[in-house]
Image: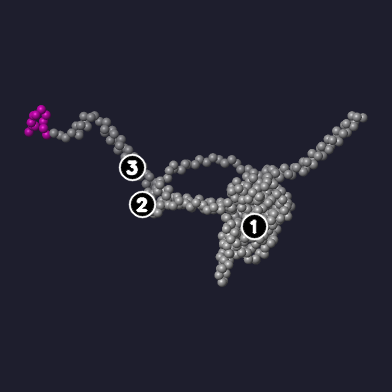
Amino acid sequence: MSVRLFSGDFRTQWLHSWALAMVLWVVAGPVLGQEEGAPGRAPNVHALSAVLMNPATGEILFAKEPHMRLPPASTTKVLTALVALEHLDLNARVPVSVQAASAPPSRIGLHAGEAALTQDLLYGLLLKSGNDAAETLAEAAGGSVPGFAELMNAKAAQVGAHESHFMNPHGLPNDDHYTTAYDLALIFRQAMNQPTFADIVRTRSAALRIESGQGVYGDWRMVPVVSHNRLLASYEGAVGGKTGFTFKARRCFVGEVDRGGVRLIVSILNSPNSGTLWQDARTLLDYGFARYGLAPLPSIQAEPVPIMVRRAPAATPAVMRVAIAPVARQRAASSQDDDDDDDNDNASSQAKPAAVAKAPVKPAVAMLAKPTPGKSGKTVQADKATKATKAKEKTVAVAKADKRPAATKVARSEPVSSKPKNGTKPRS
């Protein structure tokens, strides 16, 4: 009887254990799949944190450290725009204060005493990522930057972004200013429900009307702005997004793509550089749309093949260095401007380039040897080779002549004397 009871208890415990294991598998399986990229091959993401969300259902298709608190840089301005749209009229004329006009870069170039419509400021906020536009909107909607931050935190909590806290409207570095990739996706999801916000973030370029506030007729100027969202021009179905960058936050992005009736939101925080940021965004979106049969599965990249590169000359002539230096500096500056989408840490002015000698420098091309008229470059090289060969043959001939006996050399070199040897007179 006791054996039968023991057997029954063991069987019951085994069934309970099996049922518990099945429940854990059902609950934990999708979570583990999300962390690794869900079923199938997990995409390789360089960013520290990333989330891929279906905004229609709220389903998370991919997650990497989704709840890690990180600085969001200028992606903060998504929430700034959302709060401003709820508290300001689009056609309201908003004045620019001294504090807002002195906000560090990036800026749209507002000056104290000027004014602009709320709608124009929103374009400058989301396309150019203007910090001066952010503070102008914050002062108008919240009375001050701290007052606006309170509105931001209340709105974030309302949409479910409970792991976030905001201290300013632009995302400039602050230890108490942070969010998560998951929270940022929730905020962007809510913002895209605002038609004005959706219209602005899908725009590639615009011109803002800034009023001077002085003069009888109200002088004004136009300020062009261009979106930093590279997906708008390079990824099928991109409908908007917001970039961000500081040295602490690294590269950040949140955006939405609509393809075949399926919408996906990608949220990326702390990607190492601009190249990896856009690579991460495309990789995650390709992975998500592949699940719905709207994109091919991301292919595995093969190891790069080493390429032999000829080394450049060890040194460049001084004259050439002087001629090339200004061009090199100009190219470096332009590439830096293209790469820095939202440089919120670039508040200090950069050092000016060293002065170049005042004496006029001839173009580098004029200093190079010109080819002989009427002859191609190959013909000139052939003539030089022929002359070198003839010179070499002449040198060899002279060397052979120098090997003759010494007496012969002297005999030929001495002048012929008219006097006979031993004092005898010459014959007549």
State the extent of the magenta-drawn residues as a range: 418-428
| Disc number for residue 145 | 1
The answer to the question of whether label 1 and label 2 lie on touching residues, with beta carbons closer than 8 A, is: no
Q: What residue type is labelled 2?
A: Pro
How packed mark 1 is, by other alpha carbons closer than 10 Å (few <14, some 14-19, many 20 or more), is many
Horizontal and vertical percent for residue 109? Answer: 56, 60
Q: Of marks 3 and 1, which one's residue comes earlier in the chain?
A: 1
Whether residue 10 is visible here, answered yes or no, is: yes
Q: Which of marks 1 and 2 is in front?
A: 1
Q: What residue type is labelled 1?
A: Val
Quarter residue 259 falls in: bottom right
Q: In this view, does 328 lie above or below 4?
A: below
Farthest residue, direction bottom = 216
Q: In this rendered view, identify the residue nearer to me: 299 or 390.
A: 299
Q: What residue type is labelled 3?
A: Lys
The answer to the question of whether label 3 and label 1 lie on touching residues, with beta carbons closer than 8 A, is: no
Side (left or right) of 223 relative to 183? left
Q: Is residue 345 above or below residue 415?
A: below
Horizontal and vertical percent for residue 162? Answer: 72, 50
Q: In this rendered view, identify the residue nearer to me: 64 or 122.
A: 122
Q: Of marks 1 and 2, which one's residue comes earlier in the chain?
A: 1
